[in-house]
Image: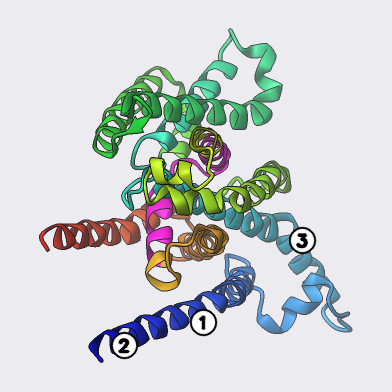
Amino acid sequence: MSVAIGTEARSLRRSAGRRSASFAIPLLLAVLTATAIVALTVGAAGIPLSRLPAALGVMSSTTADAMTARDQLVLWSIRIPRIVATAMVGGLLAAAGAIMQGLFRNPLADPALVGVSSGGALAAASAIVFTDSRFGETLRVLQTELLPLAAFAGSLATTAILYGISSRAGRTSIAIFLLAGVAITAITNAGIGLLVFIADDRQLRDITFWLLGSMSGATWTKAAVLAPILVIGLAACAFIGRGLDLLVLGEADAFHGGVDVERLKRISIVMVSAMTGVAVSISGVIGFVGIVVPHLLRLVIGPAHRLLLPASVLLGAILMVGADTLARTIVAPAEMPIGILTAAVGAPVFLGILLRQRGLASL
């Protein structure tokens, strides 16, 4: 009797989990839409909800043509590209965190925590100083195009170094990976400190942008840089989802389940590097998005990566758009760096994860 009751209880929990998971994507899309609408109306140039349809061109306005023209200029030149770029940055960082946590089978793995973001920021800061110096004067006009490439290369190099240090005989040590990440973060921060020391005022302002994180420079051009990586990342997430699910059981079990483990690792590392690098190149270093979002979603919809990865993209977008909206309004007319807000929210959640892991380890 007790076995039957236990089996029925597990079946009910699984069915409840499937129901909550099936509503996850539509619910997150609805919340993202609502968050974006709020972000469109809030700012130094406030746009009431009643004027929003006319400003977006959804319906014609018979009154206040000058006001409508102003609203359209604010929305299409400043606010909409910023919201689009911010949502994509949040989605990329959250998806990169989910992939890294699945790859290393640890909820504490995160591109920012283990130095991948810092490596991208160091490369981007180096590109800023170099292209603004007399040695890189010929490349100054290409600075916008070089920054994403430099950040990607820096993130890829950092991830490869971490993977090489923590892997031996085909096995990856999570403890060594995290400790090596702390060491690499210290090294990259030292490099950024050196660049700050030798930079002039203009270079120093740009480098400070990377250290604090901000979406104030978002444009349609930068959003266009993010879009291909996000599309490719979503396609890759659908491809590697099953492999990451099996990898939770261990590399040997995943291999016997038909997964090419080494290829999965290579694809995952490249995707984490690309997602983190291009996000860092636009927003600077923004921490805790990649660690908080996947962990919260696992508690609600479960660990299946085929749903977790797209859900992470949506929740990461919601978190970043909400944080950016708060950042540009909480101290208006000034603007607070978005990295401060994400750290203020993410650090307590991270401590909660650590305490929860300690509680599970003591059982």
Q: Is residue 215 visible?
A: no
Quadrant location of the C terminus in the rendered image:
bottom left
Mark 1 residue type: Arg
> Is 250 placed above or below 194 here?
below
- For mark 3, give the secondary structure: helix
Which label lies toward us, 1 or 3? 1
Mark 2 residue type: Ala
- The reply to whether the magenta stretch includes residue 287 is yes
Q: Position of residue 112 (x, y in %)?
A: 39, 42
User: Mark 3 highlights which residue?
Assistant: 73
Label 2 and label 3: CA atoms lie apart by: 65 Å
Q: Position of residue 54 (x, y in %)?
A: 81, 77
> Is 68 placed above or below 259 here?
below
Task: Tell me where residue 271 sits by quadrant.
Answer: top right
- For mark 2, give the secondary structure: helix
Which residues fall within the magenta stretch?
270-296
- The reply to whether the magenta stretch includes residue 292 is yes
> Is 293 placed above or below 225 here?
below
**Going from the N terminus, do you reach mark 2 or mark 1 first?**
2
User: Mark 1 highlights which residue?
Assistant: 19
Q: Residues within 10 Å of mark 2 (few under 14, many from 20)?
A: few
User: Mark 2 highlights which residue?
Assistant: 4
Name the main secondary structure of what is drawn in magenta. Answer: helix
Q: Are marks 1 and 3 in contact (CB under 8 Å)?
A: no
